[in-house]
Amino acid sequence: MMSLVWLIDDDAPTNLLNKILLKESGFAKEVQDFIYAEEALNELASEDTEFPDLILLDINMPRMNGWEFLQYLKALNRMVTPPTILMLSTSLNPVDRQRAEENKIVSGFIKKPLTTDQLLDLLERYQD
């Protein structure tokens, strides 16, 4: 079980469903969601913030998209070991998947909707 998972997605109903799935499946003790990526960045910039074990990051969001979030996160230069970051998207664009695979701080690309099978696979891959 992961201690803390962050959902960064502008779709509140999707965040609610994912939060329920993550908690009821026993995947995460705590799940925090953010509608806007810059809110998550502001949290990460605070020295008092506990870094999440996993960030599920949407690509297409208003104000700041997932790729921009990653650039700003890298610029924060605060993390010694970044949390596991997975792009969670409805994007069918193969360029998005390739871009995620080539990004050094992204651990993978998951197609929405998030499922129990995907969570079991994630637990196997990323659990300490």
Image (tube, rainbow, N blue to C red):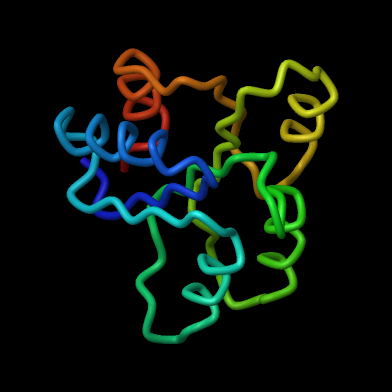
- Measured as percent of width and height from the top left, residue 73 is found at 66, 65
Residue occupying the point 56% across, 71% down: 79
- Name which residue lies at 40% across and 36% down: 126
Q: Quadrant of the N terminus?
A: top left
Q: Quadrant of the C terminus?
A: top left
Q: Toward the viewer: 118 or 63?
A: 63
Q: Is residue 22 left or right of residue 118?
A: left
Q: Quadrant of residue 37?
A: bottom right
Residue drawn at 51 percent across, 22 percent down: 112
Q: In this view, does 116 lie above or below 29?
A: above
Q: In this view, does 45 lie above or below 20?
A: below
- The front one of 98 and 79 is 98
Farthest right residue in view: 95
Q: Image point 25% across, 29% down: which residue? A: 21
Residue 19 versus residue 80: which sits nearer the camera?
19
Q: Where is residue 75 in the image (x, y as percent from the top left)?
A: 74, 72
Please provide percent x and percent y for residue 82. 54, 59
Total residue callouts: 0
Residue 23: name its quadrant. top left
Residue 65 locus on image (x, y percent): 71, 50
